[in-house]
Amino acid sequence: HTKSSRAMAAVAEAAVAVKRVLKAAVTHIRKDANLYELTKQLPEFGVGSKVALRKWELKGAPDSYYTLTRMVPKPSGRNGKCWGTFTWKGQLKNDGAEARVRGGMKTGIWKVIEDERSIHGPVLTLPPVARVAAGEGAAAAVAGGEDGGGEAQK
């Protein structure tokens, strides 16, 4: 029984470890994420991005946001310190001075305003296809986009 009890204890310990890893891995899809959890998905931890409180839009201020200027995240990425410039109803406040963003740990109240630095990444394009002389057989037909039959199938 000692071997089986040790094996069961090892399995239970492994299950706890797996749960801990999975919990850490899925924080990016939490519906009620805080500011730090939202911005850790962005380049440079969100510096340069615009973030807003969800309730500002309901209050008639959809063009109000913080532009993040500095982030000091904790190693977990779930909390830290954040600074930015504040824009209210399209007007830059405090002469554009950097101020501490308050309430970053509150969950479910923040949204990232999409911009060109979004989490979707760069736009990828295919390289141009090189044309091959028709006398090189099947490779020419595939590279040239022809079906091999050419003029005869009209």
Image (spheres, rainbow, N blue to C red):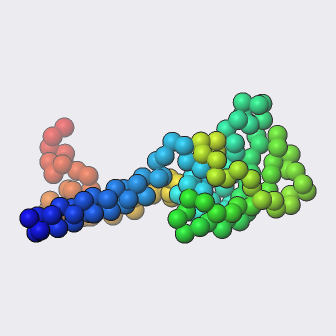
Q: Position of residue 107 (x, y in %)?
A: 60, 45
Q: Say whether residue 152 is left or right of residue 113.
A: left
Q: Say whether residue 5 is left or right of residue 44.
A: left
Which residue lies at the image location 70% right of the left edge and 61% below the top edge? 82
Q: Position of residue 20 (x, y in %)?
A: 38, 59
128 is higher (above) or lower (below) than 61: below
Q: Say whether residue 112 is left or right of residue 14.
A: right
Residue 118 visible in rendering: no
Which residue lies at the image location 22% right of the left edge and 66% below the top edge? 10
Quadrant in which the C terminus appears = top left
Residue 86 visible in rendering: yes
Quadrant in which the N terminus appears = bottom left
- In this view, the residue farthest toward the left is 1
Which residue lies at the image location 64% right of the left edge and 63% below the top edge? 80
- In this view, the residue farthest toward the right is 95
Specify the quadrant of the image occupied by residue 75.
bottom right
Count up the numbered dots.
0
54 is higher (above) or lower (below) than 120: above
Q: Nearer the viewer, residue 59 or 19?
A: 19
